[in-house]
Image (tube, rainbow, N blue to C red):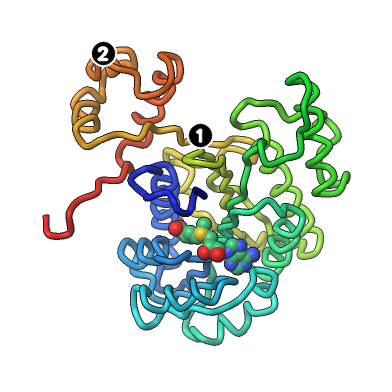
Protein backbone atom coordinates (compact mmCIF):
# COMPACT_ATOMS: atom_id res chain seq x y z
CA UNK A 1 0.00 0.00 0.00
CA UNK A 2 1.55 3.36 -0.97
CA UNK A 3 1.50 6.28 1.48
CA UNK A 4 -1.25 7.92 -0.60
CA UNK A 5 -3.55 4.94 -0.05
CA UNK A 6 -3.16 4.76 3.71
CA UNK A 7 -6.19 6.38 5.38
CA UNK A 8 -5.48 9.66 7.15
CA UNK A 9 -6.36 8.13 10.55
CA UNK A 10 -3.25 5.97 10.09
CA UNK A 11 -0.93 8.74 8.94
CA UNK A 12 -1.33 11.60 11.38
CA UNK A 13 2.12 13.01 10.54
CA UNK A 14 1.20 14.04 6.98
CA UNK A 15 -1.89 15.73 8.38
CA UNK A 16 0.18 17.53 11.05
CA UNK A 17 2.76 18.56 8.46
CA UNK A 18 0.03 20.14 6.32
CA UNK A 19 -1.58 21.90 9.32
CA UNK A 20 1.75 23.43 10.39
CA UNK A 21 2.14 24.68 6.82
CA UNK A 22 -1.29 26.31 6.97
CA UNK A 23 -0.40 27.94 10.29
CA UNK A 24 2.85 29.18 8.73
CA UNK A 25 0.90 30.65 5.80
CA UNK A 26 -1.38 32.42 8.29
CA UNK A 27 1.70 34.12 9.78
CA UNK A 28 3.46 34.86 6.50
CA UNK A 29 0.45 36.26 4.69
CA UNK A 30 -0.76 38.57 7.48
CA UNK A 31 0.67 41.77 6.02
CA UNK A 32 0.09 41.14 2.31
CA UNK A 33 -3.31 39.50 2.93
CA UNK A 34 -4.28 35.92 1.94
CA UNK A 35 -6.80 37.36 -0.54
CA UNK A 36 -3.96 38.51 -2.76
CA UNK A 37 -2.58 34.98 -3.23
CA UNK A 38 -3.07 32.18 -5.76
CA UNK A 39 -2.59 28.71 -4.28
CA UNK A 40 -1.06 26.15 -6.68
CA UNK A 41 -0.41 22.50 -5.84
CA UNK A 42 -0.91 18.88 -6.76
CA UNK A 43 -4.00 18.46 -4.62
CA UNK A 44 -4.35 14.69 -5.02
CA UNK A 45 -7.78 13.11 -5.39
CA UNK A 46 -9.45 14.95 -2.49
CA UNK A 47 -7.71 18.35 -2.59
CA UNK A 48 -7.19 18.20 1.17
CA UNK A 49 -4.62 21.00 1.09
CA UNK A 50 -6.90 23.19 -1.05
CA UNK A 51 -9.70 22.73 1.46
CA UNK A 52 -7.33 23.64 4.31
CA UNK A 53 -6.15 26.91 2.76
CA UNK A 54 -9.72 27.78 1.74
CA UNK A 55 -11.28 27.03 5.13
CA UNK A 56 -8.52 28.39 7.34
CA UNK A 57 -7.20 31.30 5.27
CA UNK A 58 -10.04 32.07 2.87
CA UNK A 59 -7.90 31.60 -0.25
CA UNK A 60 -10.33 30.98 -3.12
CA UNK A 61 -7.94 31.52 -6.03
CA UNK A 62 -6.76 27.94 -6.39
CA UNK A 63 -5.14 25.87 -9.08
CA UNK A 64 -4.62 22.11 -8.80
CA UNK A 65 -2.89 19.91 -11.33
CA UNK A 66 -2.20 16.23 -11.79
CA UNK A 67 -0.64 14.10 -14.49
CA UNK A 68 -3.42 11.52 -14.17
CA UNK A 69 -6.67 12.43 -15.98
CA UNK A 70 -8.87 10.37 -13.68
CA UNK A 71 -7.41 12.18 -10.64
CA UNK A 72 -8.23 15.49 -12.33
CA UNK A 73 -11.84 14.37 -12.97
CA UNK A 74 -12.05 13.45 -9.29
CA UNK A 75 -10.56 16.79 -8.27
CA UNK A 76 -13.18 18.64 -10.31
CA UNK A 77 -15.83 16.67 -8.43
CA UNK A 78 -14.24 17.42 -5.04
CA UNK A 79 -13.07 21.01 -5.44
CA UNK A 80 -13.83 23.33 -2.51
CA UNK A 81 -15.46 26.01 -4.65
CA UNK A 82 -16.16 26.45 -8.34
CA UNK A 83 -13.30 28.96 -8.45
CA UNK A 84 -10.76 26.13 -8.06
CA UNK A 85 -9.20 25.30 -11.43
CA UNK A 86 -8.15 21.65 -11.87
CA UNK A 87 -5.89 20.88 -14.80
CA UNK A 88 -4.34 17.84 -16.43
CA UNK A 89 -0.68 18.74 -16.36
CA UNK A 90 2.73 17.35 -15.49
CA UNK A 91 4.81 19.37 -13.06
CA UNK A 92 7.42 19.73 -15.84
CA UNK A 93 4.99 22.12 -17.57
CA UNK A 94 4.25 24.24 -14.53
CA UNK A 95 7.07 26.79 -14.96
CA UNK A 96 5.88 27.61 -18.50
CA UNK A 97 2.24 27.80 -17.34
CA UNK A 98 2.77 30.22 -14.43
CA UNK A 99 1.78 33.26 -16.51
CA UNK A 100 -1.42 31.53 -17.76
CA UNK A 101 -2.32 30.64 -14.19
CA UNK A 102 -1.75 34.23 -13.04
CA UNK A 103 -4.04 35.42 -15.88
CA UNK A 104 -6.84 33.18 -14.62
CA UNK A 105 -6.81 35.19 -11.37
CA UNK A 106 -5.98 38.72 -12.58
CA UNK A 107 -6.58 40.51 -9.27
CA UNK A 108 -3.97 38.44 -7.39
CA UNK A 109 -0.37 39.47 -6.99
CA UNK A 110 1.38 36.51 -5.31
CA UNK A 111 1.79 32.74 -5.57
CA UNK A 112 1.99 29.91 -3.10
CA UNK A 113 3.36 26.89 -4.99
CA UNK A 114 3.63 23.40 -3.50
CA UNK A 115 5.27 20.58 -5.45
CA UNK A 116 4.07 17.57 -3.46
CA UNK A 117 6.13 14.81 -5.08
CA UNK A 118 6.05 11.20 -3.98
CA UNK A 119 8.53 9.64 -6.46
CA UNK A 120 12.33 9.64 -6.34
CA UNK A 121 13.20 11.32 -9.63
CA UNK A 122 15.24 13.86 -7.68
CA UNK A 123 17.16 15.40 -10.55
CA UNK A 124 13.98 16.29 -12.45
CA UNK A 125 12.25 17.47 -9.27
CA UNK A 126 15.09 19.82 -8.35
CA UNK A 127 15.33 21.16 -11.91
CA UNK A 128 11.58 21.85 -11.87
CA UNK A 129 11.97 23.55 -8.49
CA UNK A 130 14.69 25.84 -9.84
CA UNK A 131 12.61 26.72 -12.91
CA UNK A 132 9.72 27.71 -10.67
CA UNK A 133 11.91 29.60 -8.18
CA UNK A 134 13.30 31.89 -10.88
CA UNK A 135 9.75 32.80 -11.92
CA UNK A 136 8.60 33.78 -8.41
CA UNK A 137 8.74 37.25 -6.89
CA UNK A 138 8.77 39.12 -3.60
CA UNK A 139 6.11 37.77 -1.24
CA UNK A 140 5.74 34.36 -2.91
CA UNK A 141 5.95 31.06 -1.03
CA UNK A 142 7.49 27.87 -2.44
CA UNK A 143 7.18 24.40 -0.94
CA UNK A 144 8.54 21.05 -2.07
CA UNK A 145 7.94 17.57 -0.68
CA UNK A 146 10.42 14.84 -1.63
CA UNK A 147 10.67 11.16 -0.88
CA UNK A 148 13.54 10.90 1.63
CA UNK A 149 13.36 7.16 2.25
CA UNK A 150 16.89 5.76 1.94
CA UNK A 151 15.45 2.28 1.24
CA UNK A 152 14.55 3.48 -2.26
CA UNK A 153 18.21 3.97 -3.16
CA UNK A 154 20.13 1.02 -4.61
CA UNK A 155 22.04 -0.45 -1.69
CA UNK A 156 22.82 -4.07 -2.66
CA UNK A 157 23.83 -6.49 0.07
CA UNK A 158 26.74 -6.24 2.49
CA UNK A 159 27.52 -4.74 5.85
CA UNK A 160 25.56 -1.66 7.02
CA UNK A 161 28.62 0.50 6.13
CA UNK A 162 28.82 -0.99 2.63
CA UNK A 163 25.11 -0.46 2.05
CA UNK A 164 25.38 3.13 3.31
CA UNK A 165 28.25 3.80 0.88
CA UNK A 166 26.27 2.25 -2.00
CA UNK A 167 23.29 4.48 -1.21
CA UNK A 168 25.52 7.57 -1.42
CA UNK A 169 26.82 6.34 -4.82
CA UNK A 170 23.25 5.69 -5.98
CA UNK A 171 22.19 9.21 -4.98
CA UNK A 172 25.16 10.70 -6.84
CA UNK A 173 24.19 8.67 -9.90
CA UNK A 174 20.59 9.93 -9.68
CA UNK A 175 21.49 13.57 -9.12
CA UNK A 176 24.83 14.03 -10.85
CA UNK A 177 28.02 14.31 -8.78
CA UNK A 178 28.07 18.12 -8.63
CA UNK A 179 24.66 18.16 -6.96
CA UNK A 180 25.62 16.13 -3.89
CA UNK A 181 28.14 17.50 -1.35
CA UNK A 182 31.53 15.75 -1.55
CA UNK A 183 31.35 15.16 2.21
CA UNK A 184 28.44 12.73 1.69
CA UNK A 185 30.14 9.35 1.39
CA UNK A 186 27.48 7.28 3.13
CA UNK A 187 23.75 7.43 3.74
CA UNK A 188 23.13 5.33 6.80
CA UNK A 189 20.04 3.77 8.37
CA UNK A 190 19.36 6.72 10.70
CA UNK A 191 15.91 8.10 9.86
CA UNK A 192 17.05 11.54 8.68
CA UNK A 193 20.18 10.51 6.73
CA UNK A 194 18.74 11.06 3.27
CA UNK A 195 16.55 13.99 4.37
CA UNK A 196 19.68 15.80 5.59
CA UNK A 197 21.27 15.47 2.14
CA UNK A 198 18.11 16.37 0.21
CA UNK A 199 17.57 19.56 2.19
CA UNK A 200 21.08 20.58 1.12
CA UNK A 201 20.11 19.79 -2.50
CA UNK A 202 17.06 22.06 -2.22
CA UNK A 203 19.25 24.84 -0.83
CA UNK A 204 21.56 24.32 -3.82
CA UNK A 205 18.58 24.67 -6.19
CA UNK A 206 17.81 27.98 -4.44
CA UNK A 207 21.44 29.13 -4.82
CA UNK A 208 21.31 28.29 -8.54
CA UNK A 209 18.07 30.25 -8.86
CA UNK A 210 19.65 33.20 -7.07
CA UNK A 211 22.55 33.21 -9.52
CA UNK A 212 19.97 33.65 -12.29
CA UNK A 213 17.88 36.26 -10.42
CA UNK A 214 20.38 37.96 -8.09
CA UNK A 215 17.93 40.49 -6.62
CA UNK A 216 15.86 37.67 -5.09
CA UNK A 217 16.60 35.86 -1.85
CA UNK A 218 15.19 32.42 -1.11
CA UNK A 219 14.79 32.09 2.65
CA UNK A 220 13.95 28.75 4.33
CA UNK A 221 10.92 29.11 6.63
CA UNK A 222 9.93 25.54 7.52
CA UNK A 223 11.72 22.20 7.10
CA UNK A 224 9.91 19.08 8.24
CA UNK A 225 10.19 15.34 7.87
CA UNK A 226 7.93 12.45 8.82
CA UNK A 227 7.50 8.76 8.04
CA UNK A 228 3.88 7.64 8.05
CA UNK A 229 4.86 5.05 5.44
CA UNK A 230 7.83 6.24 3.42
CA UNK A 231 10.02 8.96 4.98
CA UNK A 232 9.30 12.33 3.37
CA UNK A 233 11.04 15.69 3.52
CA UNK A 234 9.24 18.99 3.03
CA UNK A 235 11.04 22.29 2.57
CA UNK A 236 9.24 25.62 2.46
CA UNK A 237 10.96 28.86 1.56
CA UNK A 238 9.87 32.40 0.81
CA UNK A 239 10.98 34.79 -1.86
CA UNK A 240 12.22 38.16 -0.73
CA UNK A 241 13.51 40.99 -2.86
CA UNK A 242 16.53 42.78 -1.39
CA UNK A 243 15.21 46.27 -2.26
CA UNK A 244 11.57 45.70 -1.21
CA UNK A 245 10.08 48.32 1.15
CA UNK A 246 8.06 45.79 3.12
CA UNK A 247 10.26 42.93 4.45
CA UNK A 248 9.11 39.39 3.77
CA UNK A 249 8.73 37.50 5.98
CA UNK A 250 7.70 40.15 8.52
CA UNK A 251 9.70 40.21 11.77
CA UNK A 252 6.88 38.46 13.69
CA UNK A 253 7.71 35.26 11.76
CA UNK A 254 10.91 34.75 13.77
CA UNK A 255 8.83 34.42 16.97
CA UNK A 256 6.90 31.46 15.57
CA UNK A 257 7.55 28.19 17.45
CA UNK A 258 8.60 26.33 14.28
CA UNK A 259 10.55 29.19 12.66
CA UNK A 260 13.49 27.92 10.65
CA UNK A 261 16.88 29.03 11.96
CA UNK A 262 18.94 27.62 9.08
CA UNK A 263 18.64 25.34 6.04
CA UNK A 264 19.86 22.26 7.90
CA UNK A 265 17.36 22.39 10.77
CA UNK A 266 14.56 19.89 10.13
CA UNK A 267 11.61 19.29 12.47
CA UNK A 268 11.03 15.54 12.72
CA UNK A 269 7.31 14.85 13.12
CA UNK A 270 7.29 11.41 14.75
CA UNK A 271 3.96 11.20 16.54
CA UNK A 272 2.38 7.86 17.44
CA UNK A 273 -0.79 6.59 15.77
CA UNK A 274 -3.30 6.89 18.63
CA UNK A 275 -6.87 5.81 19.25
CA UNK A 276 -9.20 8.51 20.60
CA UNK A 277 -9.02 6.91 24.06
CA UNK A 278 -5.20 6.91 24.03
CA UNK A 279 -5.14 10.50 22.87
CA UNK A 280 -7.47 11.68 25.65
CA UNK A 281 -5.25 9.97 28.22
CA UNK A 282 -2.11 11.61 26.86
CA UNK A 283 -3.81 15.00 26.65
CA UNK A 284 -4.70 14.77 30.32
CA UNK A 285 -0.98 14.19 31.06
CA UNK A 286 0.53 16.55 28.52
CA UNK A 287 2.43 18.71 31.03
CA UNK A 288 4.20 15.69 32.52
CA UNK A 289 7.58 14.26 31.53
CA UNK A 290 7.65 11.60 28.79
CA UNK A 291 8.13 8.72 31.26
CA UNK A 292 5.04 9.80 33.22
CA UNK A 293 3.03 10.08 30.01
CA UNK A 294 4.03 6.52 29.14
CA UNK A 295 3.15 5.41 32.68
CA UNK A 296 -0.32 6.89 32.15
CA UNK A 297 -0.73 4.72 29.05
CA UNK A 298 0.66 1.57 30.71
CA UNK A 299 2.06 0.34 27.36
CA UNK A 300 4.58 1.43 24.72
CA UNK A 301 2.99 2.98 21.61
CA UNK A 302 6.24 2.23 19.67
CA UNK A 303 8.48 -0.85 19.56
CA UNK A 304 10.38 -0.09 22.77
CA UNK A 305 10.66 2.47 25.57
CA UNK A 306 13.30 4.61 23.82
CA UNK A 307 11.23 5.01 20.65
CA UNK A 308 8.07 5.54 22.68
CA UNK A 309 9.76 8.35 24.63
CA UNK A 310 10.75 9.99 21.37
CA UNK A 311 7.14 9.74 20.24
CA UNK A 312 5.97 11.33 23.50
CA UNK A 313 8.34 14.27 22.97
CA UNK A 314 7.08 14.68 19.41
CA UNK A 315 3.44 14.38 20.52
CA UNK A 316 3.96 17.16 23.08
CA UNK A 317 5.33 19.47 20.35
CA UNK A 318 2.68 18.74 17.75
CA UNK A 319 -0.35 17.82 19.89
CA UNK A 320 -2.43 20.84 18.88
CA UNK A 321 -2.20 19.79 15.21
CA UNK A 322 -3.03 16.11 15.84
CA UNK A 323 -6.03 15.09 13.72
CA UNK A 324 -9.33 14.53 15.48
CA UNK A 325 -11.63 12.50 13.27
CA UNK A 326 -15.31 12.78 13.97
CA UNK A 327 -18.50 11.47 12.44
CA UNK A 328 -19.85 14.13 10.12
CA UNK A 329 -23.09 14.34 12.12
CA UNK A 330 -21.29 14.81 15.50
C1 LIG B 1 0.92 13.28 -2.51
S1 LIG B 1 -0.39 13.56 -3.62
C2 LIG B 1 -0.94 15.14 -3.19
C3 LIG B 1 -1.51 15.28 -1.81
C4 LIG B 1 -2.01 16.65 -1.43
N1 LIG B 1 -1.10 17.74 -1.75
C5 LIG B 1 -2.34 16.70 0.06
O1 LIG B 1 -1.89 17.60 0.78
O2 LIG B 1 -3.06 15.81 0.53
C6 LIG B 1 0.46 13.81 -5.08
C7 LIG B 1 -0.38 13.88 -6.34
O3 LIG B 1 0.44 14.41 -7.37
C8 LIG B 1 0.35 13.65 -8.55
N2 LIG B 1 1.68 13.73 -9.15
C9 LIG B 1 2.83 13.11 -8.74
N3 LIG B 1 3.86 13.50 -9.51
C10 LIG B 1 3.37 14.41 -10.40
C11 LIG B 1 3.95 15.19 -11.43
N4 LIG B 1 5.26 15.11 -11.68
N5 LIG B 1 3.16 16.02 -12.13
C12 LIG B 1 1.83 16.10 -11.88
N6 LIG B 1 1.21 15.37 -10.92
C13 LIG B 1 1.98 14.55 -10.18
C14 LIG B 1 -0.05 12.26 -8.12
O4 LIG B 1 -0.82 11.64 -9.15
C15 LIG B 1 -0.88 12.54 -6.86
O5 LIG B 1 -2.25 12.66 -7.17
Q: Position of residue 112 (x, y in %)?
A: 52, 65
Question: Is label 2 in a helix, a strand or a loop?
Answer: helix
Number of marks in picture: 2
Reply above or below: 289 against 19. Answer: above
The answer to whether mark 1 and mark 2 are in CB contact below 8 A is: no
Q: Position of residue 68 (x, y in %)?
A: 56, 72
Q: Quadrant of the C terminus?
A: bottom left
Ligand 1 neighbours mark 1 (CB distance < 8 Å): no
Dot 2 surroundings within 10 Å: few (below 14), some, or many (20 or more)? few
Q: Position of residue 250 (x, y in %)?
A: 49, 54
- In this view of the protein, which residue sits in the foreground, 287 or 35? 287
Question: Is label 1 in a helix, a strand or a loop?
Answer: strand
Tag 2 residue: 295
Q: Nearer the viewer, mark 1 or mark 2?
A: 2
| Residue 239 visible in the shown view | yes
Reply above or below: 68 against 227. Answer: below
Mark 1 vs mark 2, CA separation in Å: 24 Å
Amino acid sequence: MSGADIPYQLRPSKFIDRQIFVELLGRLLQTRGPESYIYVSMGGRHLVDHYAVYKELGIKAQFSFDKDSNQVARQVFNRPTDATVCALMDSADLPARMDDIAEKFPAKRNFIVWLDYTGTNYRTQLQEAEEILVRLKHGDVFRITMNADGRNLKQGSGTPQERAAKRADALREKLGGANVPTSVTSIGDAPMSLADVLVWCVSLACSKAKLRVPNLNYIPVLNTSYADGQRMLTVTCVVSESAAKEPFPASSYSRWAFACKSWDKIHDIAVPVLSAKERFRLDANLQKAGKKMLAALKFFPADDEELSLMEMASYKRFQRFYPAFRHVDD
